[in-house]
Image (spheres, rainbow, N blue to C red):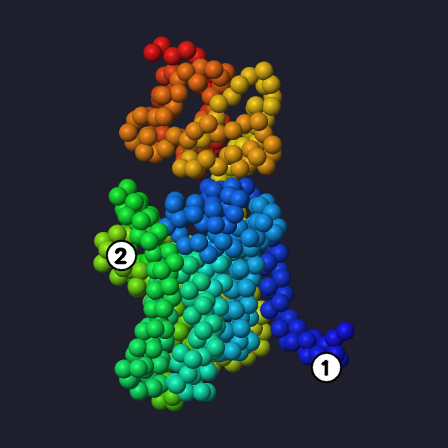
């Protein structure tokens, strides 16, 4: 049984942080209830092609190494999760949901330590409801793991900095917080290679802070270099050859071209397009006002640090800005140096947590000014922090929450079930299935529903570009079937006019079941080719 004193301490802790735990529970439950959609292609890569299709985790990692540039940590953890809990959609997405919940806890703990409970609650609420965390808590992919590790890394860095202030710089490396931070940062690099931009920003911030606090020396410089580069060296040892080989092969195919709607004209445009506007609904003038408030936060923090020395709140303010901005700047410089750009909002998921904190800081600045201009109104709002946070979230954050909740994934499961119904409904007919997808995914769902259907082959974009398809060499085999089913899962029908034209010329198109986006199935009745 729990001792009375311990029970009292626990109940006091739960009571003191009850608002935060309520936010954590409600947002976790919301995401849980919305996570039952069909897997889409990238998730099926994780669950099937680099997951339970293999008999061991080492076999799965080998398949990942042969086919992808991405590091293996998330895939390894997911493999163990599937072995323990199963491979259902909600089950595997629970791992991501727990990661985002863990990220929320770490962010709350960090802001609680630096700014107090009022801002910590606001930051937790904003972060839990923002588009990127909400969406990727409902996907079986590595971005939720990135969010957890990046917030944990930031929390550990502040613990590490505090230990240096207490024990002195002689403990720069021989320090338990340094060991924990290095391990988490290595895990970040082994989760997604773009996380190196976050670590670069964190390393620069820490170096500036350290040099501001202590005198420069050769030993300190070497230790600081070790602080930043050790995880990178370990990544190079563990996964470097795989990444180099993948990069060369992708580069030869032009796969590292721009993936966004427009090239990165400036770091500011990248920040706005990939981070801010993904998560917040800001009118143009409000976005400028938000930027101005962030600049004011920077100016006030630097001024106080310059005149008063170390203040954890002001150091944290500058860190949150650096956490948001510096990774974007480093990515922009890397794109410029290598003359190649590859970016999607999800690649910069690590910039999302500080955005939640900065929105809270901007709100506090406005409330502070309002309290001066309209004391009665200002005092009433300051006395109702949860109400203010809910109001700000409703205006700026909830539109992103709604967009994430309503996000429709490609229905691979529905397409598989349609084909299965077709096959089972015609027991005397033979069906041949071709899936237009880089890697076949329907076999995963065929196996789950115990369907007699299987995927015979998968025409590729490369074959479409060349105008020649493997199924041209399979005419004799195709004639042994009654129907040929062409399934568009990841790729769409409009992207394959040559393939559709070839099949239409050689077989009779009998039914088409395609969505507006061009995904679904086309059914051809097999007939003798005139050729």
Residue 125: percent from the left, percent from the top? 54, 65
Against 495, residue 145 (above or below) is: below
Q: Residue 275 appears at what percent x and percent y?
A: 39, 59
Q: Nearer the viewer, residue 420 or 217?
A: 217
Residue linked to disc 1: 5
Q: Earlier in the sequence, mark 1 or mark 2?
A: 1
**Mark 1 vs mark 2: in front:** 1
Residue drawn at (74%, 78%) of the image: 3
What's the mark number on residue 107?
none
Q: Judging from the image, what secondary structure is the residue with disc 2 in? A: helix
Residue behind mark 2: 335
Residue 151: image location, x then y, percent: 47, 67
Label 2: how many residues lie within 10 Å, few (<14), some (14-19) or many (20+)?
some
User: Can you say whether 42 is above or below 358 in the image?
Assistant: above
Locate the N terminus and report the quarter of the image it occupies: bottom right
Q: Residue at x 39, y 85 (%)?
A: 170
- Please report the residue visible at 42 percent of the width from the left and 66 percent of the height from the top: 185
């Amino acid at each position: 049984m729990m001792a009375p004193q311990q029970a009292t301490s626990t109940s006091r802790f739960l009571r003191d942080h009850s608002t935060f735990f309520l936010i954590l529970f409600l947002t976790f439950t919301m995401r849980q209830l919305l996570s039952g959609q069909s897997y889409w292609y990238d998730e099926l890569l994780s669950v099937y092609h680099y997951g339970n299709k293999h008999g061991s985790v080492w076999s799965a990692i080998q398949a990942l190494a042969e086919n992808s540039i991405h590091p293996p940590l998330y895939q390894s953890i997911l493999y163990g999760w599937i072995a323990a809990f199963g491979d259902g959609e909600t089950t595997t997405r629970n791992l991501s949901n727990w990661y985002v919940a863990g990220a929320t806890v770490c962010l709350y703990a960090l802001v609680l330590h630096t700014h107090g409970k009022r801002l910590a609650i606001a930051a937790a609420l904003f972060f839990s409801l923002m588009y990127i965390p909400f969406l990727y808590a409902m996907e079986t992919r590595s971005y939720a793991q990135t969010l957890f590790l990046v917030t944990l890394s930031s929390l550990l860095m502040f613990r590490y900095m505090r230990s240096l202030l207490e024990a002195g710089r002689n403990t720069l490396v021989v320090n338990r917080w340094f060991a924990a931070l290095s391990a988490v940062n290595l895990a970040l690099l082994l989760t997604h290679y773009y996380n190196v931009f976050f670590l670069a920003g964190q390393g620069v911030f820490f170096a500036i802070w350290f040099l501001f606090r202590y005198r420069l020396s050769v030993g300190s410089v070497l230790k600081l270099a070790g602080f930043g580069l050790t995880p990178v060296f370990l990544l190079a040892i563990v996964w470097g050859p795989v990444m180099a080989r993948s990069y060369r092969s992708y580069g030869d195919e032009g796969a590292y071209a721009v993936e966004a709607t427009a090239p990165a004209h400036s770091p500011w445009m990248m920040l706005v397009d990939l981070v801010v506007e993904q998560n917040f609904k800001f009118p143009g003038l409000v976005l400028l006002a938000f930027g101005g408030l962030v600049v004011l936060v920077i100016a006030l923090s630097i001024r106080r640090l310059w005149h008063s020395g170390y203040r954890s709140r002001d150091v944290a303010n500058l860190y949150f800005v650096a956490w948001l901005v510096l990774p974007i700047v480093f990515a922009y410089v890397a794109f410029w140096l290598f003359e190649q750009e590859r970016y999607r909002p999800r690649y910069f998921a690590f910039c999302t947590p500080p955005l939640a904190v900065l929105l809270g800081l901007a709100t506090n600045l406005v409330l502070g000014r309002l309290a001066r201009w309209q004391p009665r109104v200002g005092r009433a709002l300051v006395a109702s922090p949860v109400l203010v946070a809910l109001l700000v979230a409703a205006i700026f954050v909830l539109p992103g929450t709604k967009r994430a909740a309503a996000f429709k994934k490609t229905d691979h499961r529905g397409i598989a079930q349609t084909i299965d119904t077709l096959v089972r409904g015609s027991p005397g007919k033979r069906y041949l299935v071709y899936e237009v997808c880089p890697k076949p995914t329907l076999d995963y769902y065929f196996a789950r529903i115990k369907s007699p259907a299987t995927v015979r082959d998968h025409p590729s974009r490369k074959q479409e570009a060349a105008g020649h398809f493997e199924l041209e060499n399979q005419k004799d085999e195709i004639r042994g079937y009654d129907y040929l089913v062409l399934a568009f899962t990841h790729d769409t029908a409009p992207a394959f006019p040559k393939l559709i034209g070839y099949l239409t010329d050689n077989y009779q198109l009998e039914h088409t079941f395609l969505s507006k986006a061009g995904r679904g199935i086309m059914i051809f009745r097999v007939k003798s080719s005139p050729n």
